[in-house]
Each structure stands twice: as C-alpha cells, then as structure tokens.
Image: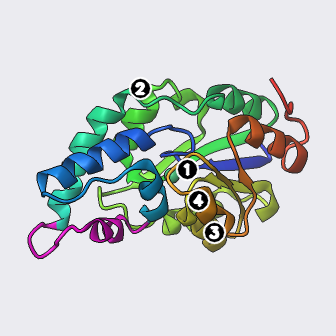
Amino acid sequence: MSGTRALIWDWNGTLLDDVEACIAAVNTMLSRRGLPRTDAERYRRQFGFPVRGYYELLGFDFTRDRWNDVCVEYHALYESLARSSPLRTGAEHLLDDLRIAGCRNLVLSASETSLLKRMVEARGLGARLNGLHGLSDLHGRSKAHLGRSLLRELALPPGHVLMIGDTAHDSETAAEAGCGCVLMEGGHASTERLLSLGRPVLRDIPALREWLAANFLPGLRATR
Ligand SMILES: [Mg+2]
C-alpha cells in the first residue's frame, strides 16, 4: 500500500449524510412501541455508543424487547431508508485529492461489515478507499479494538495517521489507537458535545479540506 500518511474515516455521519434516515428508522420503532418520537436536536444530544444505551434512553424496555431483535428491526428500516442518503458534499473530490497528494483513505465503522460494504459500493467509493473495516454483528458496541489493530497494520508514525469522525466514540477510538482525531459537525452528535472533547471541530467537508491542507497534508489543495 503506498502513501506515507493515512486518514481513517468514520462512515455514518462523517462521509455519509444519513442522520435523517437514522432518525426516521428510530421514530418508526418508537411509534411501534407507543413511545414518544425524537427529532434531530434531541437525537444529536442523546445518540452514542454502545448503541444499546441510546435505546434505553429512548425508553426501550429490554425485559420485553430482545436486543438482537431491536438491532435486526432497526437495520431493516435503516438500510431501506438510507438508500437515498447522499455522501456529504465534497467528500468524493476530497478523497480523490487526498489520494493524489499521497494519503491512504480507510473507513473504520461500528456498522456491520457486509452492510458497510454494500453502502460504500452503492456510492461508487470502493475504488477510492484503501480499506474498509466494520464489525461482525449489528449490535453497534465499539470499534476501538479495530482502531488499535488498524494502527498496527498501517505501521506509520502516529502523527501520520488521523481519524475523522462525528461522535465521541470516534475521539475515544483515536485515543485508544494512539492517533489524532478531528470531528465533523452536522453528523450524529451536537456541536456542543463535540466541542467538549478537546479535538478540532470542523463545520463541513470544505472546512475539513482546509484544515487538512494546513495541518496534516501540505501537498493537498486547500480549495477545489
Ligand atoms: Mg459516525
């Protein structure tokens, strides 16, 4: 694998703009159980990993619902709803320009691997990525262990690897893996929560590009 630097991208909310699809899936499940629906503001304030804790906050009763059934139900709804979720604006061009500037691009997600692969392929991103790493089940527990092994595999100096995410779990995964992290607004966590994590917080993909050109990859054009 060529490239002396690497970016490890989160998928949901970071490269993929799927917050609406997630909220719609969650709201369908809440309605089915007679529980109050959520909205974008509350979702971004409450959502987190492990995902089971988020469902408990919403009022799911796991003495009645089996956790695995909830995961299967959610993913059936989500996969159908997220078919129309776009990539975040400018993501494809940025991935191309990063590669040209000598940077590897990998995806590390708490999604189940085959679902992740289907979503990435459906958006024509397979060839733009140097690796795709997800979990073996639908339970959305933690991807921290994958982050650690990925860093070992990359065999690059820690300062040459950066994680890009949209939740506290991305920041925690980077800390455990021993690399830096920048966080994107507009994903699955509120700006307030992101700012409390002590990482750079960027508005969107153009702002991320500018930040990367100034702080991580001097060969990258700051605008396109
Ligand atoms: Mg995410």
Q: What's the residue type where badge 3 is placed?
A: Ala
In this figure, which residue is indicated by the disc labeled 2? 122
Question: Which mark is first along the chain, 1 or 2?
Answer: 1
Q: Which residues are magenta?
A: 49-66
- Can the viewer see residue 114 in this picture? no
Q: Residue at x 82, y 33 (%)?
A: 101
C-beta proximity under 8 Å, tags 4 and 1: no
For numbered disc 4, what is the local secondary structure?
helix
**What is the crowding at mark 3: few (fewer than 14 residues within 10 Å), some, or many (at least 20)?**
many
Residues under labels 4 and 1: Cα distance?
Answer: 13 Å
Q: Quadrant of residue 60?
A: bottom left
**What is the crowding at mark 4: few (fewer than 14 residues within 10 Å), some, or many (at least 20)?**
some
- Can the viewer see residue 151 in this picture? yes
Question: Which mark is first along the chain, 1 or 3?
Answer: 1
**In the rendering, at what x and y percent does residue 68 appear?**
18, 62
C-beta proximity under 8 Å, tags 4 and 3: yes
Left or right: 142 with respect to 37?
A: right
Mark sitting on residue 10 = 1
